Amino acid sequence: MKTHWLVRPRTIRLLWMVFIIVLAATVGAEFFVHEPTHEGIGGSFGFGAWFGFGACAVLILVAKGLAVFIKRPDNYYNVRDD
Amino acid sequence: MTDFLHPGLVLIAAGLVLTLLRGRARTVLTLLAPAGAVAIVLAMPEQVLWQGTFLGYSVTPFAVDKLSRLFALIFSLMAFGGGLFALRQANRAELPAAFVYAGSAIGVTLAGDLLTVFVFWELMAVGSTLVIWSAGTRTAYRASMRYAMVHLLGGVVLMAGIVGHVATTGSTVFERIALDSPAHWLILAGFLINAGAPPFSAWLPDAYPEASWSGTVFLSAFTTKTAVYVLLRGFPGTEILVYIGLVMVFYGIVYALLENDMRRILAYSIVNQVGFMLVGIGTQMALNGAAAHAFTHILYKALLLMSAGAVLYETGNRKCTDLGGLFRTMPLTMVCGTIGALSISAFPLTSGFVSKSMVAQAALDGHLEIVWLLLAAASAGVFLHAGIKFPWFVFFQKDSGLRPPDPPWSQRLAMLFFAALCIGLGIFYEPLYRRLPFPVDYVPYTGAHVVGMLQLLLFSGLAFFVMLPLLKRTLTITLDTDWIYRRLGPALISALEYVIVTVDRAVRSATLATTRAGVRIAGLALGEHGRRARAPTTATMVMWIAVLLTLYLLVYFASRR
């Protein structure tokens, strides 16, 4: 079976490069549209970028931490229910 | 009475007639009834249309204002899209049940009094339980029973509140309710149970994903959004809703991140989205935002669940661990699912962007800086758990080896219709803003806002791919509050049973032993060979008579003194 062009390593490398350029562009765009609408950290430079990344990292770590206590095999209920 | 038919009753009647129809007639009515409801909703004037008395109370089963029209419109549109998507559903009970369910939801939005609200509220519970039941599996049956229990409890709480309210005020009118009496708290609690608020949030991810491929699409739309509607009308500006909403927002994200079942991911994300709406039940701007978000949410969540339903229909699989790589053979489903995913994430040019930003802006205008920051974090989290996670694990990820085709035309058409609405409302948002309950003075597309949102979302995407190893799917579920009634409750009952049986057994055997010992002791004295059973001798008799005579003499002398 031929590998689909989208999943070839070359394409994936290219996609990563494009992604990084787009990321840089969204931060760079702030030089042109910066409007002082927010006070506090909401108005800091590249707020969306660092806050978005940070929030996701925290959420993932919190979820993983919680999983230690409340994760169960997915037949947990079925053993008796079915 | 006026010339206008009640659009909810039209759908309910159509649902009942559908049980009798087959073939082309069924298809025609499935599409015509909701289309008719949409037409009525657009044409009906903003006034009280039906009024009467029931058991001495005045009832208003059909009253229209901007807010009720907005919700009735999206509910009838949803019934149309859901009906189109469900045309190939082989189970003949599901669609009728879904139409009764949708019609009752419209009934709640057009109700001007609390009695009518309650009647349609309960009818919704019946319709939705039947939709889950129609999936026909044992798991679905059990889930539908748990679902019914929670909603009947919610109904009882609501009824108690309504009875208390009517008893003290004498009024059945459904208007703004202040939290100043136990009855009003009960009404709020009854509404919140249907909204999926903690600690009752677990009913939603427990029950909805067990419905059929088409049933879940209907379920996602009505119950929680009807709850948002009644909260908007009954409890605007209630501060506690902001905090309940924030809990729901993060609960939804964390649980969705840990989930392996694609439809349970989307179910948790409903709780998350309803959380955004509850946060928005404050100022006029926020109320507009909450109403707009409910409208757009129904469209993109239905679209997401349609694409998940199409995958389930074609592959029979629901778990991310079994799926992946489907973009090769289901391109249309992938594109539509991704449009839904981008909309729920509030990407610019999608419907979520124009509605969710109003809620955030209202928090900012109200100087709720912390709430605004939490909402921004939650927006990033939505992109993480629904915006990327869902399409990535279902359509990309690894190659699962599955090569299913895109679904039949009815399902493709329904997905295209909703995808078009998601994009359309993202670009031409004026028709939506015009229908919001309060005048809108807000422009979603400003340079700073678009750039800020793109940063937030794209860097969330970066976080997703950087931390992908931590998000690898496993064959697990995550315990939720339903554990209390599925495991803890039964365990407590078993424990109680054990205690009762043990104590009962101990008491019985102790009583038996005591009785036996008594019988034995009595036997020694009174039995056949016991002392009492022997015939007394003459000497003994003489001795006892002597004793009696002595006693008699003593008593005699004592009394003479």
Image (spheres, grey):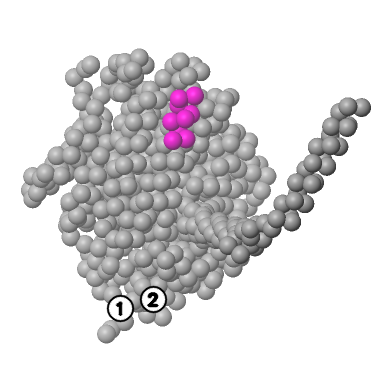
In three-dimensional space, the C-alpha distance between marks 1 and 2, rounded to whole angstroms, equals: 9 Å
Depth check, front residue: B303 or B108: B108
Q: Position of residue B269 (x, y in %)?
A: 45, 53
Q: Are marks 1 and 2 in contact (CB under 8 Å)?
A: no
B184 shown above or below B142: above
**Residue B105: horizontal and vertical position, in percent?**
32, 36
Check residue B158 for magenta coloring. yes
State the image quarter where residue A69 is shown. Answer: bottom right
Whether marks 1 and 2 lie on the same chain: yes
The residue singled out by tag 1 in the image is: B401
Q: Residue at x 53, y 47 (%)?
A: B199
Q: Nearer the viewer, residue B193 or B220?
A: B193
Question: Which residue position holds label 2?
Answer: B398
* Quarter of the image with the N terminus of chain B in it: top left
Majority secondary structure of magenta residues: helix
Can you give x and y, in whole percent of width and height, for residue B225 in the image? Answer: 39, 40
